[in-house]
Amino acid sequence: MRFMVIVKANEDTENSVMPTTEELAAMGDYNEELVKAGVMLAGDGLYPSAKGARVAFDGKGGTTVIDGPFAETKELIAGFWIWELPSLQDAVEWLKKAPFQTGEVEIRQIHGPEAFESVVTPEIQAQEDRLREQIAAQGR
């Protein structure tokens, strides 16, 4: 199973307050442990919402672009990991080892192909397979 581990934003992350050298080193050690265990597939921090945008879809083909910053900090994401583990409980156990002092982190399972078995046609599956091959070939 793959999981997205979502690090929630706070006032510091929204104000571009960077971690201390010690905090960064601790997170580097934690990430190294995740990689050595074969858990971490990807992970990064995000710029504050002031450097982002949202696109709202109106259901009629129209869109509205909303530039950041966004007011509700508790709804924002400051960073993420993509992990691969056998279960949600395993992801929870790994997350408990994270070097956070405060804040909240959310874990969400990523859909696998099994979630779409009832609606995926052979053509859609072939397209998905092609896209995954192209992404792999790009080295991403």
Image (tube, rainbow, N blue to C red):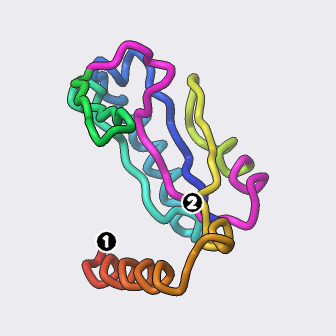
Residue 17 picture quarter: top left
Q: Using the image as rendered, state which of residue 11 and residue 3 is in the foreground.
A: 3
C-alpha separation, residue under disc 2 versus residue under disc 1: 16 Å
Residue 62 placement, left or right of 131: left
Kind of element beneath mark 2: strand
**Which kind of residue does numbered mark 1 sit on?**
Arg
Q: Is residue 50 above or below residue 39?
A: above
Amino acid found under the numbered disc labelled 2: Trp
**The N terminus - image quarter:** bottom right
The image shows residue 33 at horizontal and vertical percentages of 56, 60
Quick one: label 2, few (<14), some, or many (20+) residues within 10 Å? many
Query: Percent from the top left, x then y, of residue 81?
Result: 49, 51
Which residue was labeled with disc 2? 83
> Which residue is at the front of the view, 33 or 110?
110
Mark 1, residue position = 140
Q: Which mark is residue 42?
A: none
- For the residues labelled 2 and 1, say whether their Cβ atoms are less than 8 Å apart: no
The residue positioned farthest toward the front in the image shown: 60
Q: Which residue is drawn at 22% across and 24% down?
A: 67
Mark found first going from the N terminus, 2 or 1: 2
Give whichever of 69, 105 is nearer the camera.
Answer: 69
- Residue drawn where x is 50% and y is 30% of the image: 8
Indicate the secondary structure of the residue bearing disc 1: loop
In the rendered image, which quarter contains the C terminus?
Answer: bottom left
- Stretch of the chain drawn in magenta: 69-92
